Image (cartoon, grey):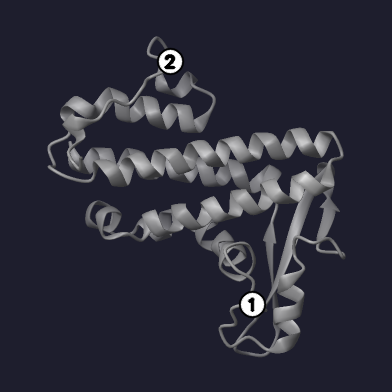
Amino acid sequence: MQHFKSWTIKDKYSEKPLQDIECVSDRANSLWSRNLKNIVIEDGAINIMGALDTLEALDYHFTNYIKLKDSKNDVCNKHEVAAYLNRIGQLYYFIISDFTKKYVPNSLELMSKVNELKIFRMKNTAHRSIDAPKGEPAYYKNRQAIVLLGFSSYLIIEGNNTQYLLPTHSESGETKWNCFTPEIDHKIVMNESYQLMELIIINIT
């Protein structure tokens, strides 16, 4: 199952140049589909299939987020945000995996937005610091626990974008405000992910 020859990756837009495929997760699938026959390594297929599934999920949750935002459905909207950030965690662990680092040693440097956003997954969505503390002061555990519950946990910023805020404790004792702005950050995450996929393909074909 680890061999790429065991898999078929659907190219939904085989008639289009890659740069004309608007949805990045679809473009990534097409990229891999068009390069399968050129792959020379014997393993890694499951790693890539999982990453492609994660990219598809990120596009899915972002699309739902926009639809729910427009409908003013705040309750369901926050759950889409949580689901999105959990998938960010999956993408982060793919980026730092032995497989990815073998072919792109500086992978985390290339995925700076995921590296920024992973803190939301680590402190709030995968589990909350108040339930599974990692040495944070009580004040931060309480504040981190309510990031997606409302209670002034987000701001509406320029262009009607929503910015979620997560406070974390720095070694200097100052509060570091981590920001997630889906309408801006999603595009960065997907573009960085596609560029990483291109580099992996270059190095395994």
Q: Say what amino acid the circle numbered 1 marks.
A: Asp
Closer to the eye: label 2 or 1: 1
Residue 25 rendering spot, x and y as whole percentages:
48, 33
Residue 147 picture location, percent across and down: 75, 65
Left or right: residue 29 compared with residue 153: left
Question: Is 113 left, or right, of 42 in this rendering?
Answer: right
Rendered location of residue 96, percent (x, y): 36, 61
Residue 170, image quadrant: bottom right
- Which residue ends up furthest to the front in the rendered image? 131
Callout 2: helix, strand or loop? loop
Check disc 1: other Cα within 10 Å, few if <14, some if 14-19, many if 20+: few
14 up-or-down from 28: above or below? above
Q: Label 2 belongs to which residue? A: 13
Point 83% across, 57% down: residue: 155
Mark 2 belongs to which amino acid? Answer: Tyr
Residue 40 lies left or right of residue 161; in this view the side is left
Badge 1 element: loop
| Residue 47, position as x, y percentages in the image | 30, 47
* Label 2 with label 1: CB-CB less than 8 Å: no
Rendered view: 149 above or below 33: below
Q: Around disc 2, counting alpha carbons within 10 Å, would you say few (fewer than 14), some (14 to 19), or many (20 or more)?
A: some
Q: Could you say which is closer to the camera, residue 54 or residue 21?
A: 54
- Residue receiving disc 1: 131
Image quarter of the N terminus: top left
Give the residue displayed 68% in from the left and 50% down from the top.
Answer: 81
